[in-house]
Amino acid sequence: MNLHEQICNWSNLRLAYQNASRGKRGRGATAEFESLLADNLLELEQELKEQTYQPGAYSNFYIHEPKRRLISAAPFRKLFF
């Protein structure tokens, strides 16, 4: 299995969701995504296989502990239906 096939693999996508949702479950886009988890993962799998997946825009913000740093955070996948 090549790397692209490994990335598109169902169990890998499920694990990626679990890691990405850690500490965010039940809130905003994470809760929306989880409400139809299987459908959303299947759609993501198809987009990855077809190479049509487009990531969302990053949000940028500063934290000040212990020093001022710029953080760029990727959004949780948005639903489009």
Image (tube, helix red, strand yellow):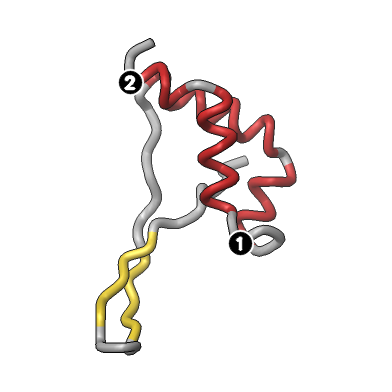
Picture quadrant of residue 63: bottom left
Which quadrant does the N terminus fall into?
A: top left
Q: Secondary structure at mark 2?
A: helix
**Can you tell which mark lies on residue 24?**
1
Q: Is residue 41 left or right of residue 61?
A: right
Is residue 49 depicted above or below 53 in this figure? Answer: above
Give the residue number, with chain letter if any, for mark 2.
3
* Percent of width and height locating residue 17: 56, 43
Looking at the picture, tell me which residue is in the foreground, 5 or 45: 5
The residue at 39%/50% (across/down) is 56
* Circle 2 crowding by C-alpha within 10 Å: few under 14, some 14–19, many from 20: few
In the displayed orientation, state which residue is furthest to the right. 35
Which amino acid lies under the numbered mark 1 shown in the image of this protein? Lys
Is residue 46 depicted above or below 35 in this figure? Answer: above
Circles 2 and 1: CB atoms closer than 8 Å: no
Picture quadrant of residue 50: top left
The residue at 59%/26% (across/down) is 42
The residue at 56%/23% (across/down) is 10
Is residue 73 depicted above or below 11 in this figure? Answer: below
Is residue 6 depicted above or below 66 in this figure? Answer: above
* Percent of width and height locating residue 51: 35, 24
Between the residue at mark 2 and the residue at mark 1, the CA separation in whole angstroms equals 28 Å
* Circle 1 crowding by C-alpha within 10 Å: few under 14, some 14–19, many from 20: few
Q: Secondary structure at mark 1?
A: loop
Q: Is residue 38 left or right of residue 49?
A: right
In the displayed orientation, state which residue is furthest to the front. 66
* Percent of width and height locating residue 68: 25, 87
